[in-house]
Amino acid sequence: MSLREIEYNKVDGFSKLLIDYVSNSDHFNDLISDFPSIDNLNKQISRKSKNYDKTFRETLIKEISTQYNDIDLTELQKSNIKKLAENKTFTITTGHQLNLLTGPMYFIYKIISVVNLCEKMQRKYSKYNFVPIFWMASEDHDFDEINHFSFHGSKFNWSSPQTGIVGEFKLDSIKDVAIEFEKFVSDFPYSNEIIKIFRDCYMNSTDLSVATRKLVNILFRKNGLIIIDANNKNLKSLFCDIIKKEINEKIIFNQSKKSIQRLNELNYNIQANPREINLFYIEDGKRERIIEMKNGFQTSNGLKKWSSEQIHDDIKSSPEKFSPNVLFRPIFQEYILPNICYIGGPAEVAYWLQLKSVFESLNISFPIILNRNSALLLDKRLIDKLNKLDVSIEEILMPKEILKEKLIKKYSKLKLDFTNLKQNLTDQFLELKKIASQTDKSFIGALSAQEKKQINGLNMLEKRLMKSEEKVHQDKINRVLKIRDKLFPNGKPQERISNFSEFYVNKGIDMISLIKNNLDPLSRKFSVIEF
C-alpha cells in the first residue's frame, strides 16, 4: 500500500468543506443520500433500481458502441458495454474537462478511484455488475482552462483562435506543442512511448473529443473503463422532458435554495451559484447562455430568440443544441445512467452538495458522492534526502510557514519555545491579582497592563531568537524548502499542477498500475506513494 496515509487536515491545500466531508460530519446529513461506504453503496443500488428508466439501457449501449467505432476494445470493455443491458448492472462515474494531455495528475486519480471502487464492489457484491464510466465534458467552452499542461515546471500551451465547445476544436495547430514537448522528454527511458501517445492521439484525430477518448483509452482500456461523450442527440433526447422543466420551472435555481442556505449557515463557500436557467444553446460554433425575456427566451448574445412554444419545439427536434451547465450536467448524467456513485474532486463535492433537493424534486436518485483519491508521488531519492535532513513526510506536507518554524526549532540547540515561560508569568500575575482583589482592586488594572507588557516582551524576544537561529541554520532549512517547492509547484499540491507524463517517462504504462495498487478509494486520507 501507500508509503503513508495522512489525514487531510494535516496536509496543506485542502478546504474546510472537504476536511469536514471526509470526516463524515453530521451537518451534511440533509445534503447527501449517504456517506461513502461499501454498505451504503449497496443501499444505493436499491434506491437507483426503483426510479431508473430501464429502457435507457438500449440507447446507452447503442451510442457507446457507435462512439467506439474506430477504437479497438479490450475483451473487458466489450463485456462491460454488453453488461449495461442487464438490470443488475450499475455504473460508478467520474468526469472531467478535456485537458490537454489530461492536464494535472488529479485527472488520473479520479479515474483510478472509479476503477478501484468498481473492483471493490464487484468483489463484495458479485451478484451485480459494476462498470467504470468516464464522462467527457466535451461541451465545456472554457478553452483557457484546458489548453495547457506542465512538465517539470515547464508549461506547454496550445493556442487556437477557435471558439465554442472545446470538444469540437480541430487539432491542426497542435503540431507546435508536440515539437516543443518532444525536446523536453527526449532523454527519459520512456520518451518514445509518451511522444508516440501524444502524436497518435492529437495529430491523428479529427477533434479534441476524439483525441481525449484515444488518450484515456490508452491509459485505462485494460481496466475496462467506458468513456461517454454525452454531446449527442440520442442521449439528450432521453432528457428532453427535464430540459423543458428547467426552462419552465427554473428547477435548479428554485430547488437548490435550501441547500445553498444550509451551506452558507455552515460558513462554506458556494462553489457554483445557479442561474435562473442553467442551460446553454449551441449553434454556429458558439455556446451561449439561455436567458428568459418578457416575451420568451433568447441567447445571451441576442442572436437566437424563441417564444415559449418555439423553444419547446426546438428542444424536441434538436435536443443536441441544448447544453447543461456545471449544475445541470449532474442531473443529465444521473438521469440517463444507472449510476450509484459520482467521484469528484473537492470543488465537485462542494457543488454536488447543493443539488440533493433538486434531484428529489425530479424523483431522480441522488448518488453517493465520493471525494477522489488525492496523492503525492515521492521519488525515493527525495525520501532519502528528507531522512538525512531529519524531516518526516508529515512535516513536508505542512503549510510552508509552519514547516519553517518547526525546522528552526528542530535544528536549533536552544530552547526557542517560550510557552512555559509565558504560562508561568500568567500564573504569577494571577496570584498578584488575587492579592490585589483583597486589598486594592484598583491595582488590578495596573497589574493587567504590566502582564501584557511582559508577555509582549517575551513574544518579541522569542521572534528575535527565531530569526537569529534561522540565519544560523539557513542552508539546511533552504534545502528542505527546496524539496517542498518541488512537491508543491507554484505553492500548490503536486496533483494540481504536474502532468502524468512527468512520471510516465520513467515508468511507462506501468505507472498506472503502480498508482492504482497503492490507492484505496474509500480511505478518506491523503496518500503518499514512493515512486
Image: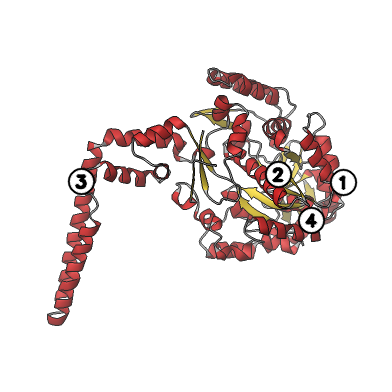
> Between disc 4 and disc 2, whose residue precedes?
4
Residue neighbourhood size for the residue with mark 1, other residues' Cα within 10 Å, grouped as few (<14), some (14–19), many (≥20): few
Name the residue located 21 percent from the left edge and 41 percent from the top edge: 468
State the CA–CA distance, disc 2 to disc 1. 31 Å
| Residue 410 at x, y percent in the picture | 29, 44
- Residue beneath disc 2: 288
Give residue 504's quadrant in the image.
Answer: top right
Q: Which marked residue is nearer to the observer: mark 4 or mark 2?
A: 4
Mark 2 or mark 1: name the one nearer the start of the chain.
1
As displayed, is residue 520 above or below residue 150? Answer: below
* Residue shown at the point (73%, 38%) measured from the top left: 224
Q: Which residue is mark 3?
A: 414
Give the distance between the C-alpha atoms of the residues marked 4 and 1, in whole angstroms. 20 Å
Name the residue tied to disc 4: 242
Q: Name which residue type carries label 1.
A: Glu
Q: Look at label 4 and name its amino acid.
A: Ile
Q: Would residue 275 be visible to someone looking at this image? A: no
Judged from the image, the secondary structure of the residue bearing numbered disc 4 is: helix
Quadrant position of residue 172: top right
Marks 4,2: beta carbons within 8 A: no
Read off the residue under disc 1. Answer: 58
Nearer the observer: mark 3 or 2; the answer is 3
- Locate the N terminus by quadrant: top right
Between the C-alphas of marks 4 and 3, the distance is: 68 Å
